[in-house]
Amino acid sequence: MDLYEHEAKQLFGEHGVPLAERQLARTPEQAVLSAARLGGRVAVKAQVKAGGRGKAGGVKVAADPEEAGRHAERILGMDIKGHTVRSVLVEQATDIAEEYYFSVLLDRAERSFLAICSAEGGVDIEQVAAERPGAVVRAPVPVRTGLDAATAERICAEAGLPEEVRAPAASTMRRLWEVAVQEDATLVEVNPLVRTSDGRILALDGKVTLDDGAGFRHPERTPFHNGDGGGGREEAARAKGLNYVKLDGQVGIIGNGAGL
């Protein structure tokens, strides 16, 4: 199950991953109140389970609560790659000095996890890997030993992160590793992981995919299934015990395992 950004950041916060202050809003009025509580500049971010929100106009920075409300009014109801925006995350705006990329994902072929890191975050990591393969570090992470401090710092060094941020970045990576293992996630991604102008490391975005097969071990995550969902069809399919994935195009695929 893919999580919304605000859900992913809830998990991050529970595991000590450094984050900007934020509040979820479902109406323009709530966005105004949230921006007023947070104070200063805020980012208003569409909550959809799809990439490319910024390019679609789903992420806007507001200088004051009134502007945050206007942005929310335009973003709510927007269609982004077939997903309707039903809520926005109002988050303290961050002065970014540098952007990095980090993810940990389940490598089914190797029966282990794979950590991916790059000093070139904030853009499509597939594009970076295709154009500059040396800018992306891939490091296997054995399940039994996990991502220890030495390995995390080595990954930061090989990825070209500045020496002065390697220790805090490595610490954040280890906390993201905890999210993957303790929450039974098959993907934990932060793009970008940023260094702020005052030297802090923050997870500015968050993408998490939980293993549905491990849901019985996490009854506390049931609200993630029962939220505003990815749409009527996804929720209807889940109620019948089916996995439904909405894709673009006009061809539908029904898949089954061997033995049908």
Image (cartoon, rainbow, N blue to C red):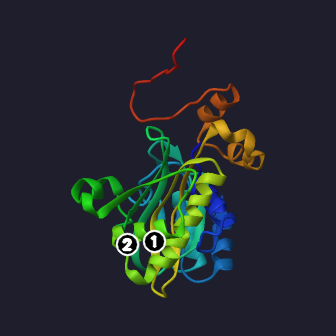
Disc on res. 88:
none
- Identify the element where label 1 is drawn: helix
Residue at horizontal 57 percent and vertical 46 percent from the top: 2
Nearer to me, 92 or 105: 105
* Amino acid identity at mark 1: Glu
Viewer can see residue 15: yes
Query: Which residue sits furthest top?
Result: 260
Residue 49 horizontal side relative to residue 248, left or right? right
Q: Are marks 1 and 2 in contact (CB under 8 Å)?
A: yes
- From the image, tell me which residue sits under label 2: 157
Residue 101 is situated, as x and y percent measured from the top left of the image, at 41, 64
* Amino acid identity at mark 2: Ala
Residue at horizontal 69 percent and vertical 43 percent from the top: 225
Residue at horizontal 65 percent and vertical 69 percent from the top: 16
Query: Which residue sits furthest left?
Result: 131
- From the image, tell me which residue sits under label 1: 153
Residue 81 horizontal side relative to residue 23, left or right? left
